Amino acid sequence: MPIVNRLADLADDITAWRRDFHENPELLYDTVRTAGKVAELLESFGVDEVTTGIGRTGVVGVIRGRNGGAGKTIGLRADMDALPIEEITGKPYASKVPGKMHACGHDGHTAMLLGAARYLAETRNFDGTVVVIFQPAEEGGAGAKAMIDDGLLTRWPIQEVYGMHNFPGLPVGEFAIRKGPIMAATDEFRITITGRGGHAAKPHDTIDPIVAGAQMVNALQTIASRNADPLDSVVVSVTVFQGGNAFNVIPQEVLLRGTVRTLSPKMRNLAEERMETIVRSVAEAFGARAELHFRRGYPVTANHDAQVDFAADVAEGIAGAGKVNREIPPMMGGEDFSYMLEERPGAFIFAGNGDSAGLHHPAYDFNDDLIPVGCSYWVKLVETALPATA
């Protein structure tokens, strides 16, 4: 695997940054310490511009090539935030913050992009401009959208944008990508069912919202089984069912909550429309009332064809023939890099994290062996997309 030698030499430094981030996890937009260290390191590398506070706590660095930055501008993005999970890895660099840990590898993503930025600032072996983007609040806070709304793509004329995420179960040194939808839209719903409470021994004098809710849970599954084209994915999961607090009382109200995952705008719209009809109709059938709140979250993460071909070729140059899966099946998890791909052409790629615990698991840890691989991918992507002419 042709890892860039200089990046292999820097691996210990990059690993140290990664483990420092891991010990000091921060959630959502509260990435003040992380962003501060990122900005400090970028300035120490001699990056041409470092701007903080984009999308509240995002950091943007600008590295100009040998021709002074004239020509094409590409963006490389890493996420910085952690998760509200209690770590159980037992690692010497485990989280020092109770109830918070880097359970998705954003510590590694940030460190790898910092390593690439250091190399690119040292060598400048490209023409054009690279914008390195360090984003807060990927885990449910839509930090990518916040940075875009704060001028990320207008203050810096980014023409293409690329993202990378580690992938447990895929061997280190291998990559996976696909054209079109690669991750799902992530929507959230809340249903309040109001009946008429009363004594559990006299159900005929009540309108039981628990029975109505049970039927509603079953009916919602018909969206996937009877409304969706079998070739178009949709997941409707009710994950919360709350109602009542006594064994002999039929409650007045029940709460259902959950998520809808889809891979196309058409199916997203259909799922919401069918939910509205099902919720209203099932409640009416039992004489109850129901209110649906459907909140749209991250859109579908949809890769652009030309950029996927380009990114996969770069990855294959790092990993070798047969080590890049160009047709990985789409996943029903969500990713707010989707907002950037709605605004600019680009590609989101997975890099193997080896045999580790799964993402969002309390025993997960980013695999430091991935560091020289991921850094080399970023560097070769830049040097290939923006070849030096002098």
Image: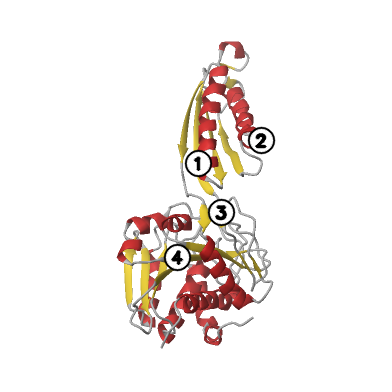
Residue located at (58% from left, 72% from top): 313
The kind of residue tagged 1 is: Glu
Asked if disc 2 and disc 4 are in contact, CB closer than 8 Å, the reply is no
Residue 339, relative to residue 255: is it above or below? below
Q: Position of residue 292 (x, y in %)?
A: 48, 31
Q: CA distance from mark 4 to mark 1?
A: 27 Å
Res. 161 mark: 4
Q: Secondary structure at mark 1?
A: strand
Q: Label for residue 225? A: 2
Measured along the vertical axis of the image, is residue 260 above or below residue 147? Answer: above
Residue contact between numbered discs 2 and 1, judged by CB atoms under 8 Å:
no
Label 3 secondary element = strand
Spatial distance from mark 3 to mark 4, Cα to Cα? 17 Å
User: Is the Cβ of the residue at disc 3 closer than 8 Å to that at disc 1?
Assistant: no
* Residue 188: numbered disc: 1
The structure residue drawn at horizontal position 56% and vertical position 45%, both measured from the top left corner, is 262
**Residue 34 visible in rendering:** no
Disc 1 packing (10 Å; few <14; some 14–19; many ≥20): some
Which of marks 3 and 2 precedes in the sequence? Answer: 3
Per the model, the C-alpha gap separating discs 2 and 4 is 37 Å
Marked residue nearer the N-terminal end (4 or 1): 4
Residue 294 location (% of width, % of height):
47, 37
| N-term mark: 3 or 1 | 3
Q: CA distance from mark 2 to mark 3?
A: 21 Å
Would residue 185 appear left or right of 230 to someone viewing this image? left
- Front: mark 2 or 1: 2
- Image quarter (top left, top right, bottom left or bottom right) of the C terminus: bottom left
Q: Could one spot residue 333 in this view of the protein?
A: yes
Q: How is the image coloured?
A: secondary structure
Q: Which residue is mark 3?
A: 183
**Label 2: which secondary element:** helix
